[in-house]
Every structure is written in structure tokens, then in C-alpha cells.
Image (cartoon, grey):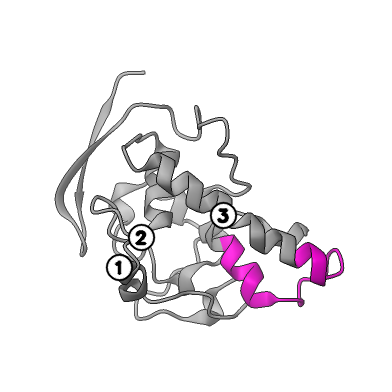
Amino acid sequence: MPTKQVVVSDLMQQGYVYHLTEAPGENFRSDFNPQLTPVEMLALGVFGGKYMSDCQDEFPAGWFEVAKLSHACHDPAMNYFGVNASKPLSYWRSKGWIYAEDPRGWFQWYCRYYMGRRCPDDARQIARWKAMTRHVAQLKKHCLPGDTNCRRKQRQALLHWAYDSRIL
């Protein structure tokens, strides 16, 4: 596939350039198998609807046709489970978990990875994604299968990491 250049211009990044070297949704690392695509996550309701409200030009318009977005503020009611399962960006920055090229964090990295960007931060972000399986194990241990009212905050957090906690 020939590479495609993407130039980002939104509230958090201006002039950042990256290249798409893979076809969208294809050629993921063999140990990275998210259960949800970015478009599915946005349609379900993640990050209080605020996460992607100013950077839609970077991604396919189809991603936003049924996305639950809140342009004004973070609104937990926009989340699939109706609860706030997010930490503020300042928390993630203080932990050193923000890669400079992806100032919004993991989901921004995932959206770009899904579209075909590969970068030096891929291994770290995939390791962080894998670490979320501890929450999957807790849901399986403490909740009856299909009981989506059990541990709703933990289920919402898993949705933020592309795990489909509705099926646990």
C-alpha cells in the first residue's frame, strides 16, 4: 500500500504530520486484537462524548454519523453505561502515559493505528491495552454473565480500551 500523509490541525495539535502505511483496520500486530473498532466505540458512547469533538477532519466522516459526542463538555450520560470512567488528562500526563505525538492518549493512538499509522509507541500502547485484561478477569469473577449492571464503571473503562464488556 502506498503511504498516505495526514496533517493534523485541531485544538490540541497543529501541523503534526504522520503517514498511513497499512490499510485501515488491517495488519495489526498479532498480539493486538481489540474487540471494538473506533467507530463502534464512538457509537456506543465513550469518554463522555468529548474526546473526539474537535478532530473529526482527521478521520473518516462515517465514524461520526452515529457517534455520541458532546461538544460542550464531558457528559457521563453520553457513555454507554452512563457513568464517568475517565481520569482527567492531567492525571495521564502526570503518570507519563501520554506519547507526545498523541496528546489525547490511548484512544487517539488506537484511532491512528486503526487507520494505518505505525509508530515507535505501538509496543507500549499495546502493552497498556493488554494490561486491561485484569479488569476483564474481575468482571468474570464478580459478575454473572450478561449482568451489565454489575460494575458499570469498570465495564465503561473497558469500553474505553476497545474491550466489549457488554458480552462478559
| For the residues bearing labels 3 and 2, Cβ distance under 8 angstroms | no
Give the side of residue 151 with respect to residue 84, left or right. Answer: right
Q: Earlier in the sequence, mark 3 or mark 2?
A: 2
The residue singled out by tag 3 in the image is 131
Asked which quadrant contains residue 71, the reply is bottom left
Instruction: Decide if residue 97 is in sight here.
Output: yes
Mark 2 crowdedness (10 Å alpha carbons): few <14, some 14-19, many ≥20: some
Location of residue 95 in the rendering, given as x and y in whole percent from the top left corner: 35, 67
Q: Earlier in the sequence, mark 1 or mark 3?
A: 1
Residue at 28% from the left image edge and 24% from the top image edge: 3
The CA distance from mark 3 to mark 2 is 13 Å
| For the residues bearing labels 2 and 1, Cβ distance under 8 angstroms | yes
Question: With respect to residue 137, does 153 lie above or below?
Answer: below
The residue singled out by tag 2 in the image is 97
Residue 158 is one of the magenta-drawn residues: yes
Give the side of residue 101 with respect to residue 161, left or right. Answer: left
The residue singled out by tag 1 in the image is 93
Asked which quadrant contains residue 93, the reply is bottom left
Q: Amino acid at mark 3?
A: Ala
Location of residue 91 in the rendering, given as x and y in whole percent from the top left corner: 36, 74
